[in-house]
Image: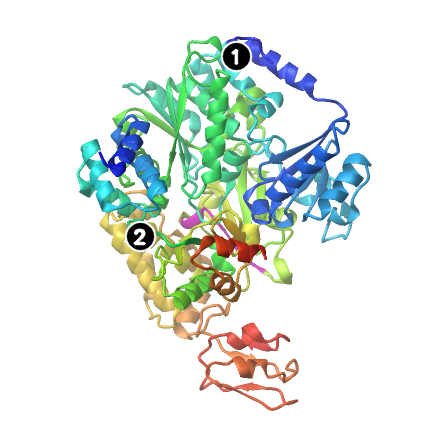
Amino acid sequence: MTVHGNGQLTDVSDLQHMREELLSLRIASAKSIHVCTGPGCTAKGSPKLYELFCKAAKQAGANVKVLPKAVGCHGLCECGPIVIVQPGDIFYQRVEEPDIAEIFRETLLGDRLVDRLVYEDPATGKKLDTVGKIPFYKVQERIALAYNGLIDPTQITDYIAEGGYSALAKVLSSMTPEDVISEVERAGLRGRGGGGFPTARKWRSCREAKGSPKYVICNGDEGDPGAFMDRAIMEGNPHCVIEGMLIGAFGIGSEQGYIYVRNEYPLSVDRLKQAIEQAKKLGLLGENILGSSFSFDIRINRGGGAFVCGESTALMASLEGRTGEPRAKYIHTVESGLWEKPTNLNNVETWANVPHIINKGSKWFSGIGTQKSKGTKVFSLVGKVVNTGLVEVPMGITLRRIVDEIGGGIRDGKSFKAVQTGGPSGGCVPAEHLDARVDFDELTKLGSMMGSGGMIVMDEDTCMVNVAKYFTEFLQKESCGKCTSCREGVSQMLHILERIAKGEGQVGDVDKLEELAELLEGTALCALGKTAANPTLSTIRYFRDEYDAHILEQHCPAKECRGLFLYEIDAEACKACGICKKNCPEDAISGEKKVPHVIDQAKCTRCGTCWDKCPFTAVMKV
Amino acid sequence: MTDDSKLIEQIVNRYGGEVGMLIPMMQDLQAECGYLPTEHLRCLGKQLGLPLSRLYAVATFYASFRLAPKGAHEVTLCVGTVCYLKGAGAVSEAICKEFGVEPGGTTRDRLFTFQAVNCLGACAVAPVMLVDGKYYESVTAESALEILSGLTKDKETAEKGAEA
């Protein structure tokens, strides 16, 4: 490895040499086996698989060159645990412990496929053996996730071998801070945390702001429920975030950075800590980086479990050791942020894009996407779709392509109802707008927003009033309570939504909700409150008939709100087995052997036990 | 000097006594003690020159801080959007009813502390429940209660039971 006494890279050429050495050390004939240890696969037991591969590689002896790697989220969580064999990009899905020996023997040693672990396209029934052939991956374009699944996130050498930190080297050896900012500006990068503010404009304001020191912050407080993009990046490729921050800090003129990580992500904290240590050891963080006059250090802070801390001013308050209460926006954080010093905050995914822009150029980046939204966006595609997972798509792709082509359509043959984007600040986009293009402005026009990237697909069984209630309840709990309109307004909205969902809604409730929404938007202090009504407003806008059915007919069309629909037994499907009768807590079901059973609606409390227990799906919701 | 104040001094020194690092200090303190005992908070406040009210504000604002000891086990149920759509609400209700516990609270016999959190990022296997760090996928009210009824106060016996 590099020859300097303390192991530090003291020059741009050192980094280049190190990379060349690392590449030459890779044995051409060696195979590597990549075990996904993203959150989905980990939940399905993938860390154990990695252990077993390591054991098998050890037992195989020194002559067999097999390198097992535990890699970050590969994306297709639905088919986890995922195992990829390189070279060849061979994709194995739903791998279990007993499969390890076979993969090792057949594929790694014998170059043969293990057919039963190969992905089968549900649409055509065809077996697709490599990543590139699978429709889920075909439509995607990966920038922020480019090295996810490829590198071992715990090894800085893996990142450097793939060209990591070369953007930093380029910046330090041939660019001025203004060059860096202009390049990002020409690329058209906009903030991936939700707001879509032009990144370079923020950087420039911070650079030009009076006061020092200046701070840069990486917002890794990913709090939207149903979203795990930033987690996948922090855990799958932590160095790209660090490199992005280094480049931004150089442009802004900052020497101290912070990464604020959500409390529920202990692994992200570990990975980042490890990455920072490794970067420091090589002199890629610290004083006089790569022999230049630029110095930069990063500190990690763990959040305390408060959603509002994703808001930039609340996050900074939390970094100062205070309760995470936001402040009014007219004081710009780029001028007076953390400790009242100029502070630039960007989201994890925004930082992860930066090295690629520097390396490949603004022209390349701005060639992807739409006129005003450049590049790609990572989404966690979840809910009632066939392929749950993490996807990165070029801006401008239609929602339909994401749901149908990548997501594989709706589960269990049900029909699509809506897709929810933007987390609790976003809204639901219905089927008639599925051909809308995904970019910052288009989604806002539809009453939703890009948000940080949660994309939750809902089917016909999802009640939209209940969805609005869920998000409003979430926001009511997470409201910090500082400003009255949010603290009281969201509570009142929840109160109304709860009574509608119980069938106790009153005529005029929808108007009241709209009135409260207007009040919140106009008077709440921060984005949490200002946008808190979006889930309610968008469901009213597109699914007004469901609200009306709840209020006027005490009926839940999706048959989800308890008490607002009936259970009946289908006489033809009923086998008179007596299970429902035995389990009914109210003795509301009658019927003899061989005679279809009947529910006495007067006695029935709509608890749903019969529906849960019937082995013949003869109990229906009507 | 008591062991407790020594521990607090250690934690304070770990962060150079910086008031801005109050939250990490409290996180470390909780990691050591399992919760934030009032006396410890008072002592930490004294060392940092902060009133107890300020520490109490922080401790009650952030969901991850606890002011009471936790149970023998940690049960975390994800109630993120996807888990909720797939029935986590009913699972949570069933657990609360069966064990007389509230989200964020601990059962009276200190068997387990129950947390309902927003999204663990494992949406592919929703609804997800974690018991002492072990994932249980696609839980239902029934299966969750079954898992929890298998918990015993003595952690070791519980683990042995799980293996068998």
Q: Nearer the viewer, residue B47 or B144?
A: B47
**Image quarter in which the C terminus of chain B is found:** bottom right
Residue found at x 75% / y 33%: A60
Mark 1 and mark 2 lie on one chain; the one further toward the N terminus is: 1
Asked if residue A421 is among those painted magenta in the image, a careful observer would answer yes
**Hey, what amino acid is under mark 2?**
Glu
How far across and how far down the image is residue A581, in percent? 55, 84
Magenta region: which residues? A416-424
**Hey, what amino acid is under mark 1?**
Leu
- Above or below, comparing residue A382 to residue A202 in the picture: below
The answer to whether tags 1 and 2 share a subunit is yes
Identify the disc placed on residue A518. Answer: 2
Q: Around disc 2, counting alpha carbons within 10 Å, would you say few (fewer than 14), some (14 to 19), or many (20 or more)?
A: some
* Colour pattern: rainbow
Subunit that carries the residue with mark 2: A
SS at mark 1 in the image: loop
Q: Nearer the viewer, residue A307 or B158?
A: B158
Subunit that carries the residue with mark 1: A
Q: Nearer the viewer, residue A280 or A564?
A: A280
- Above or below, comparing residue A496 to residue A71 in the picture: below
SS at mark 2 in the image: helix
Residue A30 visible from this viewpoint? yes
How far across and how far down the image is residue A144, in percent? 55, 32
Residue B156 relative to residue A123: left or right: left
Residue A123 relative to residue A402: left or right: right
Asked if residue B22 is among those painted magenta in the image, a careful observer would answer no
Give the mark toward the camera: 1 or 2.
Answer: 1
**Image quarter in which the N terminus of chain B is found:** top left
Identify the disc placed on residue A9. Answer: 1
Residue B82 visible from this viewpoint? no
